[in-house]
Amino acid sequence: MTKSGLNAIFIANRERLLRFLAAHGAGDAAEDLLQELWLKIEAAPPGPVGNPLSYLYRTANNLVIDRHRATTQAVKRDRAWSESVSGEAGQSDAPLSERQIIAQQQLEQVQQALDSLGQRASRIFRRHRIDGIAQKDIAAELGISLSTVESDLRLAYRTMIDLRRRFDEV
C-alpha cells in the first residue's frame, strides 16, 4: 500500500485508532497522539506498507510507550531537582507567605516591564503568550504586518529575558 493509501486507511480508522490510544494509556492525550501519528505517516518515506492497519496500530502503541517514558523521566528529573535544592521532595526552604510576596512583586515587575514597551507590544505579547493566539491572527486582529508582530515579540522576549536575569541575580 502506498503513502496515499496509508493516509486513507488512517482516515477510515481514525475513531478506532483514537479509542485504541485512549484505552492503552493515552487518556486525555489521545487526540494529541493521534495528531502525532498523522504527522509521522505524513513524514514517512513513500513506499509500500504490507499491512497498513497493523502498521498504524503498532506506531500508535509506540507513541503511547514513548509518551509514558517521557512523562516518567520528567517526574524523576523534577523530583531529583527538587530534592537537590531543598533536601526533601516537593518542599521549599522559603516560607509559603514569603514566596507569595516575592511572586507578587515579580509579577508587578513583569507587568511594569510589559507596559513600558508600549500598548501595542504589550498587547501582542499577552495575546500570543497568555491567550495562545497565533502571530498571524494577532496581525490580522490589529491590522498590522506579521513582521511587526514578530518585531514586537522579539522586543518583549528580550525584555522578559533581561528581567528574568535580574530575578535570578537576587
Image (cartoon, rainbow, N blue to C red):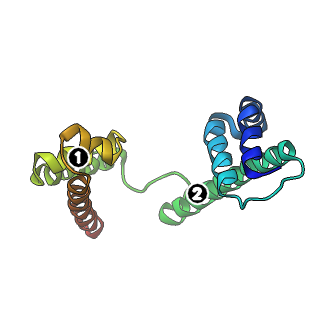
Whether residue 104 is visible = no
Q: Mark 1 points at which residue?
A: 124
Of residues 96 and 155, which is closer to you in this image? 155
Of residues 167 and 23, which is closer to you in this image? 23
Q: Where is residue 134 in the image (x, y as percent from the top left)?
A: 35, 44
Q: Which residue is drawn at 72% across and 50% down?
A: 63
The amino acid beneath tag 2 is Arg
The amino acid beneath tag 1 is Ile
10 Å neighbourhood of mark 2: few (<14), some, or many (≥20)? some
Q: Which residue is drawn at 60% across and 41% down?
A: 32
Q: Nearer the viewer, mark 2 or mark 1?
A: 1
Q: Residue at x 63, y 39 (%)?
A: 29
Q: Position of residue 109 (x, y in %)?
A: 18, 52
| Dot 2 or dot 1, earlier in sequence | 2
Rendering quarter of residue 150 = bottom left
Whether residue 138 is visible = yes
Q: Relative to 165, is 44 on the left or the right?
A: right
